[in-house]
Image (cartoon, rainbow, N blue to C red):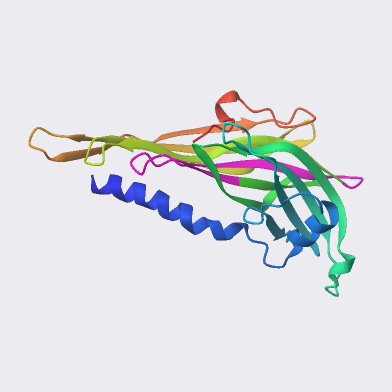
Amino acid sequence: MRSLLRHALLLLCLSAASLSHAACESGLAERMHAKLYPNRPLDERLAACKVWPAFPGRSIVVLPMPRETTDKGAKVFDLELLLIQRPDNGNTERDTVIGRLFQPEALDEDATTAIQDIRIDTSRYVLASDARAFGLRVRYRGSSAPNSPLASETVRLYVHHGNNKLRQVLQEIELDHDNGGWDSTCTGHFEKLRTMLSVGKSTSNGFADLQLSRTLIQSRAQEQEDQGCVEKALPAKFNTVTLRYDGERFKVPKSLLQQSP
């Protein structure tokens, strides 16, 4: 029971701690939003900015813009992704948009699932000699009772397509999740999925394949007749999934698509 409690509390702590990741301290997101979408609201809590180390002077900006909440309480976000070339002298007036992509209704949350934060992933996703991708990671959390902690993290990949465009090459897939439930005393179950995303050595239609190395850990707890609590960790399950490029995007099996936590 103690480990189940620790598991639940850890999820709650991670939910609170990760809110700081989304902030754009330089004000770049706010400036770009004011310039491009002066008449639309920006969710500053979820806005994300990051320098792209592979390309000197370039920064990636994500502008989440909420639409009106529906009758059922759901909130939908349009996303504007920007690739910015910044001058060496730091003159913000000369920031230049060299790539952009507008994605309507790209994210949503409802009464049971909330977007915790949005982060930009600049890992070494070299897909071809002239194509390097960056990722967009989204963390979701379930707004259910404390005895049913839920969390999920997804990723999408984008490349700079030239001609002032960004192009999405990997749709939103789930990498990690934590879910389960317990009776606040002993009996319960938890499941933890962790996925490592890497670039493979083989290629398909000009882009390197993507490798997903997945580990699934499950545990069960059951109250005994003597009122003791016994928890059992099931054997971990491992598998590797290869995603291949079809000329436009990576083909993804339905089992990997983002699911509500």
Residue at (82, 54) in percent of width and height: 38
Q: Is residue 205 magenta?
A: no
Q: Farthest residue toward the bottom? A: 89
Residue at (67, 67) in percent of width and height: 25
Q: Is residue 155 magenta?
A: yes
Q: Farthest residue toward the left? A: 226
The quadrant of the picture occupied by the N terminus is: top left
User: Quick one: 228 or 249, which is closer to the camera?
Assistant: 228
Q: Quick check: can you spot residue 74?
A: yes
Whether residue 133 is situated above or below residue 29 in the rendered picture: above
Residue 47 screen position, x and y as percent: 67, 54
Task: Specify whether 105 is left or right of 205.
Answer: left
How many numbered badges does the structure rendering display? 0
Residue 234 screen position, x and y as percent: 31, 34
User: Quick one: 54 or 2, which is closer to the camera?
Assistant: 2
Q: Farthest residue toward the front? A: 71
Task: Specify whether 130 is left or right of 111.
Answer: right
Query: Principal SS element in the magenta part?
Result: strand
Q: Quick check: can you spot residue 130?
A: no
In terms of image quadrants, where is residue 128?
Answer: top right
Residue 23 screen position, x and y as percent: 63, 61
The magenta stretch spans which residues? 138-164
Q: Farthest residue toward the top? A: 254
Task: Specify whether 129 is left or right of 78.
Answer: right
Residue at (76, 63) in percent of width and height: 28
In terms of image quadrants, where is residue 13?
Answer: bottom left
Residue 165 screen position, x and y as percent: 86, 44
